[in-house]
Image (cartoon, coloured by chain):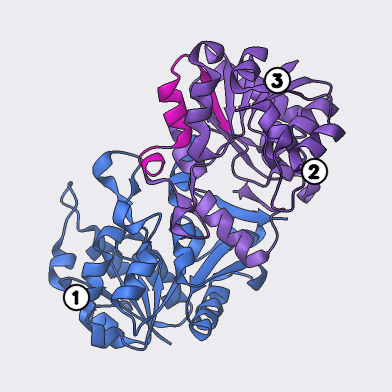
Chain colours: A purple, B blue
Amino acid sequence: MKISILGTGTVGQTIAAKLISLGHEVMMGTKNAADKLASTNKDGITIFANWHKENNRVKLGTFAEAALFSELIFNATQGANSINALNLSGKENLKGKILIDIGNPLDFSQGMPPCLIPSLSNTNSLGEEIQKTFPDTKVVKTLNTMWCGLMVNPALINNADHTNFICGNDAEAKNTVKSLLNEFGWKNENLLDLGDISCARGTEAILPVWLRIWGATKNGAFNFKIVS
Amino acid sequence: MKISILGTGTVGQTIAAKLISLGHEVMMGTKNAADKLASTNKDGITIFANWHKENNRVKLGTFAEAALFSELIFNATQGANSINALNLSGKENLKGKILIDIGNPLDFSQGMPPCLIPSLSNTNSLGEEIQKTFPDTKVVKTLNTMWCGLMVNPALINNADHTNFICGNDAEAKNTVKSLLNEFGWKNENLLDLGDISCARGTEAILPVWLRIWGATKNGAFNFKIVS
């Protein structure tokens, strides 16, 4: 199927490459595609353009072009920029569509490890803020509690037996997303549906402990498994 | 050994009973012991007095008497009241001692499920606030991420194979606490030391997702296991 990805960072690249390998048609959205392809890191290397050469079946467009391209859209932008990127995508282009929000509202302004953006945490969340801002879009929050390598390949650890949380207001949209997660290798018994989109307050709050486990173990290839 | 517990609620009772069963001498601290024994629930039943009759080897005193009683003190008070209870315990009575903080800074004022107290979350935590307020006390945060039945009996689920986080500034104090956790049934490989007390920002932030997992599964006897 046609799938869009807003955001061209490591998370977006990882998901795009996986979707292509599964036979999907993918368009990534960014603010300005030409600028993105010309952009260099501090050593002058065109990191994204190099990745795109290796993954040239991924189409590249503006946020709006990417949102228009499909009925199933990943938000893989940085949490602090997500609402802005979605506004650039255009309300009409997002209307009636499923938005898989994998962003986290991280605030790097207070030093490392980052905290959460105060206005998007505790009594709110990025997932809810997106749903409130785009009420005609079906926001499904998932995959945001782990390293992107595990998002698309859960079998990398513990025989794929660990937990991926999912929440959102629309049951049918969650079922569509669960099917795609199955394609990624997630077993249904490891998809824990917490309820409506307000549960993003819970799953986004995992980041503060995720970051500290990573700091203590020096290994990002871990996940939480709920045992009972 | 002598062990004190500040707080007489379900969590304090569960830990007190376990410690007695392990052969320790236990004193619980409360604001006013006579008032606590006389207190009734909405049906007029003296819940605490009834529990205490069944667990009459547990000594009962004021917060200050309990803090004075031992070198190892549990904070099992409600997070919103913890600093106040510790102030009533007395700085001198807590000086040089190990305080095992199992409290969570839950804020019930915004409805259910509770959020975290804004001033004690994200860029702060209850564990840190206690450590800052009582700099001569060795605060160790642990056990706060699960139902109290599991705290003292991890073997209730998954063959005791799940994760208990621990953090604090004093390595020796953490070792003492780990030994006590071993007595509760925690295996060392499941005690994940995250680092200094600022890591309480991470473990206390688990509560928002804990509450939603509980809400979705209707089962509080679960825990997180870190798999990699």
Q: Residue B108: horizontal and vertical position, in percent?
A: 27, 46
Cα distance between the residues tagged 2 and 3: 23 Å
Query: Which amino acid, mark 2?
Result: Ala
Cα distance between the residues tagged 2 and 1: 52 Å
Quadrant for the C terminus of chain B in the image: bottom right
Q: Earlier in the sequence, mark 2 or mark 3?
A: 3
**Discs 1/3, front:** 3
Between B104 and A99, the one lying in front of the other is A99
Q: Residue B145: horizontal and vertical position, in percent?
A: 48, 57
In magenta, the rendered stretch is: A119-141
Mark 3 Cα-neighbour bin, 10 Å: few <14, some 14–19, many ≥20? many
The residue tagged 3 is A3
Q: Which chain carries label 1?
A: B
Query: Which amino acid, mark 1?
Result: Leu
Residue displayed at 77% across by 47% down:
A45
Q: Residue B76: horizontal and vertical position, in percent?
A: 34, 66
Image label count: 3
Displayed quadrant of residue A66: top right
The residue tagged 1 is B88
**Discs 2/3, front:** 3
**Discs 2/1, front:** 2
Whether discs 2 and 1 lie on one chain: the answer is: no
The residue tagged 2 is A155
Between A51 and A184, the one lying in front of the other is A51
At mark 3, the secondary structure is strand
